[in-house]
Amino acid sequence: MKQTVSRRWACLAATATLAGCGFQPVYMRTGSGKPGAAQQGLSSVFIENIPERPGQVLRQALQERFDDDSGTSSDYSLHVGFSIAGQSIAVEQSDIATRLRLIGHADWSLIGHDEKHTVLLTGSAEAMDGVNIFDSQYFAADLEVEAEQTRIAENIATQIATQIATWFREKAAKAADKAG
């Protein structure tokens, strides 16, 4: 019980410290309850097609995070190059791998819809996961690999969305400082 109380005080102290230094959540809404700068910026991004099945899964995950129901036109395009590579690990003496490490990597560019199609921001994201391979259950292994690829795509989509949302938030803060 005493340990739980001290953890609560530590969390409160950390929160107070962050609030004192100007910390605000990236996806914070405005005072009127409308979407904040990060969410407004994300909703104005068109996500270009990403080839191959894992790319389609990543694009769908990005679209969920950049969700826009307001019908606003896109001011930006997001171009993503995505690949997933596999490495055999835990190899038996018979040269049969019993574990597969999957590494997903994405390089992305946020491009403005101006005349020059200016690259405004670039970045990368990476995620890694693994799957056990059972020699007698090929169908199960295929399903597990597909599930791992989906988890990797979800993780990378979150990284990309967070990086771009942070940029929109900083851009809005700089504009507010200039205006004020």
Image: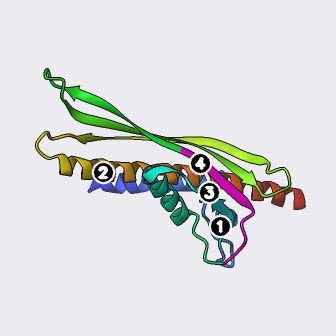
For label 2, the residue is 3
Kindly identify the amino acid type of the residue bearing the numbered disc 4: Val
> Callout 4 environment at 10 Å: few (<14), some (14 to 19), or many (20+)?
many
Q: Determine whether label 2 and label 1 are within 8 Å by CB.
A: no
Which stretch did the figure color magenta?
A: 71-81
**How far apart, in angstroms, are the residues tagged by discs 2 and 1?**
43 Å
Closer to us: mark 4 or mark 2? 4
Horizontal arrangement in the rendering, residue 42 relative to residue 7 (left or right): right
Instruction: Say which quarter of the image contains residue 44.
Output: bottom right
Indicate the amino acid at tag 3: Glu
Which residue extends farthest right? 179
State the scheme by which the image is colored. rainbow
Residue 73 lies in the magenta-colored region: yes
Q: Do the numbered discs 2 and 3 sit on residues whose CB atoms are within 8 Å?
A: no
Query: Is the Cβ of the residue at disc 3 closer than 8 Å to that at disc 4?
Result: yes
- Residue 48 numbered tag: 3
